[in-house]
Image: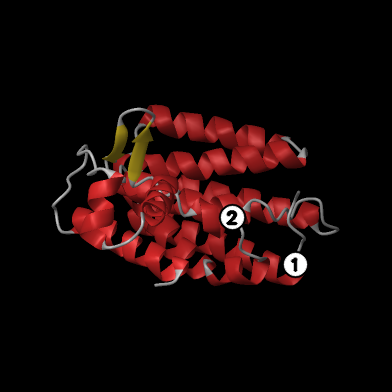
Amino acid sequence: MSDMSAVETALHGVRALIAHGSLQPGDRLPSEGELSDRLGVSRGSIREAIRTFAALGVLDTRRGSGSFVGELRAADVIQTLSLTIGLLPLESILELYELRRVLEAHAASLAAARCDPETLAELDELLDRLEATTDDEQQSALDHEFHMRILSLGGNEALAAMVGVLRARSRAYHLFPSAEGATVKALSDAGHRAILRGLEARDPVAASAAAAAHVSQTEAWLRKLRPDPAG
């Protein structure tokens, strides 16, 4: 058996123990020796499989105590996708915008039904600051905060985690410093206000439509301007 196929065997074996319920969240994994005997691979292959699952947030390795199955919360597992999505080039990111459009529209509709006056006032103040600044980094940070606040209002941590991962890579491609940056900013600010109006009206349909339109507009600018990723 080659080293790679041995590691794959170890990965599939450990995965099966967790997926089939033999190991539950919080359970300690059998020793490397026991896993090696059970799966028919070397201890080195077992260690590599454990390192892989630890990087994915599936296992928690504690020095001197062994490896334990993590909590396996959907949001935590989804967030590990940033390891790979953070490598994607622009063309691949653009492919994900359809997914972002659906997810952010749904999140806005949930938020419209759940937001309270205090949160609406905070979002309004946040947009005031976003509209007033011309600093690229600050605009990016405030824009991200606005959208993540809406996601948190939806109450679904897995949904917020997925969109957060997708948005994190998109934020590497800055539109505001371009020659058309002023136009991009004006349209972006207007899109944010449209989303907020939908939330203030407690109108899930309006909020959803505004969020979908805003994501589509960002995608269109990325396709047109094709900025390089920030370092």
Residue at screen point 64% across, 72% down: 91
The residue sitting at 57% across, 43% down in the picture is 144
Q: Quadrant of residue 12?
A: bottom left
Q: Earlier in the sequence, mark 2 or mark 1?
A: 2
As drawn, is 151 to the left or to the right of 70? right
Q: Secondary structure at mark 2?
A: loop
Left or right of 218? Residue 11 is left
Front in this rendered view, residue 27 or 95: 27
The residue to which callout 1 is attached is 226
Q: Quadrant of residue 40?
A: bottom left
Left or right relative to 34: residue 98: right
Q: Is residue 206 visible?
A: no
Q: Looking at numbered disc 1 in the image, what kind of residue is underneath it?
A: Arg
Foreground: 145 or 197?
145
Residue at point 53% right, 40% down? 146
**Number of the front mark, 2 or 1:** 2
| Residue 214 image point, x, y percent | 55, 59
Residue at coordinates 36% horizontally, 59% vertically from top-left? Answer: 205
State the residue position of label 2: 86
Q: State which quarter of the image contains the N terminus.
A: bottom left
Which one is in front, 180 or 68?
68
| Label 2, label 1: how far apart the Cα atoms are | 17 Å
Using the image, determine if residue 90 lies above or below residue 77. Answer: below
Q: Position of residue 7 (x, y in %)?
A: 40, 62
